[in-house]
């Protein structure tokens, strides 16, 4: 797989381009118990996305669907292999929320590699000099027509429900772009949580996202996942703030901290083994990347 070759290459250039490990900034703080359990719950919804498009209307699947008796499926979606975007829209009548969840992709690094890290101008009111990654934007455009009408209809039918947008890996980048479009163009209030997401655009775009979402856009990362370090910052790409960083292999609240500063105040450590990098990218509170419950 080229993802493994690319991650190996990333490890080789990291010493030259970025510090491998940066001590945690003094301004970071620990997550609350409420935040931690919310993230853990949302990670189940994220894991379920790997069952798309094979989720039934009664929200049944081979993953964690049975944990949510008051959730119903609104729609699944999947683009062609050129963009490889899939996921689902669900309605949670227990917690009064709509959940738009984008599945990750094993090919996130291949997408970046194939497009040679190309970016393009991003024209939206209030976003001067913004640029975003070509491949992520192509994914957003491919999926927007599949879900926009049904999501807006659901928001109209359930105006008091919160709107949550989730994404992992490549899906995190598409989730970010979709959320920006929905909020900036339609003025809809959205809460965004991503897992192991790459950088989407340049510093101007990151600042625009910070100003647009304030505290409603949260990025969850952890120390061995290298995808959040892509595309490289030395090429002008930048993350927005509000990073929630798992600082050890152990997934517990005590080791998860909040980095509210700018780009990369919580920097992932290079783990050395390529298998560790891939495992890390596919594990956020639980295993992602498949549509079967883990063996107990």
Image (cartoon, helix red, strand yellow):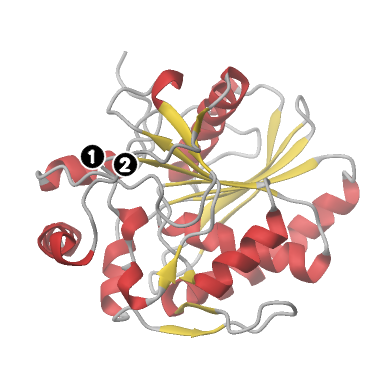
Residue that lies at the very extreme toward the top in this rendered image? 296
Residue drawn 49% across and 86% down? 120
Q: Quadrant of the N terminus?
A: bottom left
- Is residue 99 placed above or below 251 in the rendered structure? below
Which quadrant holds residue 91?
top right
> Where on the picture, by quarter, is residue 207?
bottom right
Name the element at disc 2: loop
Q: Which residue is mark 2?
A: 282
Q: Percent x, y for residue 32? A: 58, 22
Q: Residue at x 43, y 53 (%)?
A: 197
Q: Are marks 2 and 1 in contact (CB under 8 Å)?
A: yes
Q: Secondary structure at mark 1?
A: helix
Q: Residue at x 47, y 60 (%)?
A: 239
Residue 106: image location, x then y, percent: 30, 55
Q: Disc 2 versus disc 1: distance between alpha carbons?
A: 5 Å
Left or right placement of residue 271 versus residue 139 in this view? left
Q: Quadrant of the C terminus?
A: top left
Task: Please give the label number shown on residue 279.
Answer: 1
């Amino acid at each position: 797989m080229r993802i493994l070759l690319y991650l190996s290459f990333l490890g080789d250039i990291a010493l030259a381009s970025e510090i491998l490990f940066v001590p945690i900034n003094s301004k970071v703080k620990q997550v609350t118990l409420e935040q931690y359990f919310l993230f853990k719950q949302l990670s189940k919804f994220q894991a379920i996305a790997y069952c798309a498009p094979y989720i039934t209307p009664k929200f049944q699947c081979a993953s964690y669907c049975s944990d949510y008796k008051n959730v119903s499926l609104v729609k699944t979606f999947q683009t062609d292999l050129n963009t490889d975007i899939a996921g689902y829209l669900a309605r949670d009548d227990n917690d009064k929320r709509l959940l738009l969840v984008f599945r990750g992709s094993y090919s996130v690094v291949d997408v970046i590699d194939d497009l040679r890290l190309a970016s393009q101008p991003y024209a939206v009111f209030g976003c001067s000099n913004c640029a975003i990654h070509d491949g992520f934007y192509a994914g957003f455009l491919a999926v927007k027509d599949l879900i926009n009408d049904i999501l807006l209809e659901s928001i109209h039918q359930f105006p008091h429900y919160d709107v949550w947008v989730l994404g992992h890996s490549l899906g995190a980048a598409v989730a970010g772009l979709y959320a920006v479009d929905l909020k900036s163009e339609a003025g809809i209030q959205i809460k965004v949580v991503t897992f192991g997401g790459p950088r989407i655009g340049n510093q101007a775009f990151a600042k625009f996202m910070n100003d647009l979402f304030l505290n409603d856009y949260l990025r969850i990362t952890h120390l061995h996942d290298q995808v959040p370090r892509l595309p490289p910052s030395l090429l002008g790409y930048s993350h927005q703030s509000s990073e929630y960083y798992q600082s050890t292999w152990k997934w517990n609240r005590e080791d998860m901290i909040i980095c509210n500063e700018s780009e990369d105040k919580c920097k992932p450590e290079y783990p050395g083994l390529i298998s560790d990098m891939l495992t890390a990218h596919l594990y956020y509170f639980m295993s992602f990347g498949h549509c079967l419950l883990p063996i107990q």
